[in-house]
Image (cartoon, grey):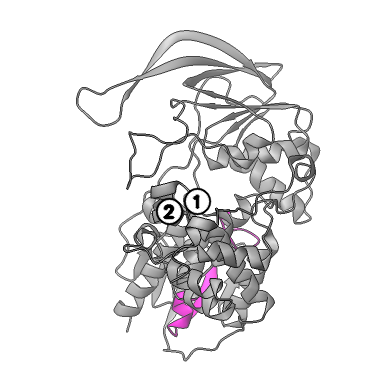
Amino acid sequence: MGNPRAFLTIPRKEAGHRPVSERVHDFSEMEQTLNTKDRQQQASRCMDCGVPFCHWACPLGNKQPEWNDALYKGDWELAYKLLSKTNDFPEFTGRVCPALCEKSCVLNLTISEPVTCRENECAIIERAFLESYITPQTYDRNGKKVLVIGSGPAGLSAANQLNKKGFDVTVYEKNEAAGGLLRFGIPNFKLAKNVIDRRIVLMEQEGINFVYNQNVDVNNLPAGYDAYVIATGTPQARDLKIEGRELKGVHLALEILSQQTRILMGQSFDKKDLVNAKGKKVLVIGGGDTGSDCIGTAHRQGCKSVTQIEIMPKPPEGSNPATPWPYWPQILKTSYAHEEGCTRRWLLNTNKFIGKDGVLTGAEVEEVVWEPNPEGGRPIMKLTGKKEVIECDMALLAMGFLKPQHPQFADNVFVCGDAASGASLVVRAIASGRKIAEEISNKIK
């Protein structure tokens, strides 16, 4: 399996990103690729370890050692076949997954240089499309019809698997194009939308029917289907109900992210409706990936400056004894967006927004401390009284999403992805869609 000694002689090598000075001026994908020789060498580092924790850590159960071995040996088609057995959309996870497999890699746990599984995965699927290993397939039909509501990663994977199992599948999407947050939440410079379009075309060729601009009331589902999949995600963002929230210049993160995507799709907006950071001092409230995407988008729109604040403490660098293996390592993460320029601050609560003539001019923040909870569980936040005003004329709220509440559904209605679990990862959504498809196949005869 791989080269059992390669990790001793071949260091981890990432493709990296385009230079900051270049990438901040456009919305093209920023991640680069390695040449074939280097990519196969990276795959060779996936050694024949006794217990491959990558299997366990991946929500999809991807068999990384198997397809890395095929890639190392130059058998790209076999690598694709092995990869596609467990993952419907490696072109998505290969670009935006946080790579739980790499955090669990034996080489990460021993020498802090895991195998480049995510990049290898992306390289495999792109070669598969390039070399036409992927062609539309036909499947025998079982006479049953399923309606999938929502075309994010969970809905798409459920639709894809159900189609393969012989169901006639229709996908209803409330927006004008498929993808959910893959399209309208993740910026183009991380996931080019032609990558999504390419997959949707393939799914249509294989018999899946997509219907757009369809708002469905889940309490009154359309008749005529044997089963229904609710894959509507987490549409409600966590808001900040404080003084000044109504000021012009305060926006939810998805307002700027989705609008920028639509602009790149060719749509136009009136000046009064435009959410654009050009020339502005931007404040991003929230320290997660969505916050980083707001920073990157603001830079590409030509902002004057960006400050990002987080209510939680600053994580330690390198390693964190509070989150040892097998926990997800809570350590300081410097994202692509932070590299592009950003003032980062922690332990700050936003008290109120300040404005003049209805327009945002700043935000009052207050330092907080977190103290142990005597009853256990989540620590208790306390305000310190140390206040200041951060000057800004745009504030972007990137504080996550609220888990949706659902009615009691009939036995033939299934909920998957973020709609079931609350906001999570793309890879978990794909896994959830696959699981629901299997449940439907077993139940709807």
Q: Amino acid at mark 2?
A: Leu
Q: Residue at x 70, y 51 (%)?
A: 30
Magenta segment range? 160-181
C-alpha distance separating marks 2 and 1? 17 Å
Where residue 71 appears, as percent x and y from the top left, is 55, 72
Q: Nearer the viewer, residue 355 or 312?
A: 312
Asked if residue 108 is among those painted magenta in the image, a careful observer would answer no
Q: Is residue 396 above or below residue 214?
A: above
Q: Is residue 36 above or below residue 346?
A: below
Q: Secondary structure at mark 1?
A: loop
Q: Residue at x 45, y 46 (%)?
A: 112
Residue named by callout 2:
107
Give the crowd class for mark 2: few <14, some 14-19, many >=20 residues within 10 Å. Answer: some
152 left or right of 313 in image: right
Give the residue at the far left of this rendering.
Answer: 375
259 left or right of 320 in image: right
Residue named by callout 1:
98
Q: Residue at x 79, y 55 (%)?
A: 266
